Amino acid sequence: MMGAEAAAKSSPDGYTVLVAGNPELTITPWLQAKTSYAPITDFTPVVLISQSPNVFVAKATLGANTLRAAFDAAKRSPGGITVGTPGNGSPQHIALELLRAQTGLDIVHVPYKGAGPATVAALGGEVTFALVGAPPLLPHIASGKLVPLAITQPRRSPLLPNVPTLGEAMGVMREDDFVTWYGLLVPSRAPADVVAQLEKAAFTVLKRPDTRARFLALGTDLVSMPGAQFAERMRSESTRYRDIIRRFGIKGT
């Protein structure tokens, strides 16, 4: 939010750009009583760079290889179905509220201050599950300490092609798209030719043969969505998050 505030107030000359994600651009404004910037009107999207799948993981010692079996096992254990997320009002928390509503499961949300602490909590058995973005999980999935059970998006991710979607795993939320994305934006007063020049420069890098592999190594899928489409995605997603936040009375951390 601090970065978004600074960028919104900066000179619209193309020399100050914002790299930001959906928490501060399509979610936080609905969680805060007042913010000093309005993402839809204060910024011009240049390119949506990439997105990371949000992944349900459990400690390998739970002994379950599917989400349904893992939930059943957790229900029989002390504490029940406890799920750590990066915090109240995060995309993962919002997805969890929808999952609880659609399945009727007794899910206990445990908010942490970031994806790292939530991952550590799952590794240590403090919670039965974690639902966080892929980057901090990948080393522990590779080592076998954490088992990936489902992702919260309509289609499988190239990053984890063998991990089912929630629709495949549980038969719910088939079209719900809860990912963590990263985009490049400038102040809305920036001239159109400046925006076009930045978009062209960004795509020059994003189209390089090695770029996709480098992004996958960082735990994120390359998207390369042009500014106009990115703007429409921000508008529609902002409305969707607003409605869900109001429906469930979700509060920020």
Image: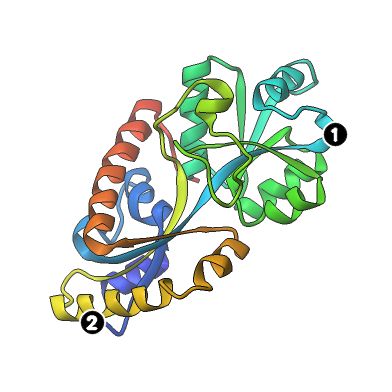
Q: Secondary structure at mark 2?
A: loop
Vertical order, 185 against 174 (above or below): below
Q: Position of residue 87 (x, y in %)?
A: 55, 45
**Residue 134's spot in the image, x, y percent?**
60, 51
- Residue appearing at x 52%, y 17% in the figure: 103
Who's the residue at 49% across and 28% down the image? 97
**Relative to 79, residue 164 above or below:** below
Residue 110 visible: yes
| Of residues 238 and 156, the one drawn nearer to the viewer in this rendering | 156
Residue 180 placement, left or right of 27: right
Residue 123 appears left or right of 55: right
- Left or right: 36, with 24 as reference point: left
Furthest-front residue in this view: 209
Counting other residues with Cα less than 10 Å from the Cα at mark 1, is it few (<14), some (14-19), or many (20 or more)?
few
The secondary structure type at the circle numbered 1 is: helix
Tell me if residue 85 can be seen.
no
**Foreground: 243 or 227?**
227
Q: Give the amino acid type for the residue marked by disc 1 in the picture.
A: Thr
Q: Residue beneath label 2, please?
A: 11
**Which numbered disc flags the more N-terminal residue, 2 or 1?**
2
Q: Residue 140, how many percent across, how many down?
A: 76, 51
Q: Mark 2 and mark 1: span between their CA atoms?
A: 53 Å
Q: Residue at x 28, y 57 (%)?
A: 230
**Which quadrant is home to the N terminus?**
bottom left
Residue 24 vertical position relative to residue 18 in the rendered view, above or below = above
Residue ID for mark 1: 61
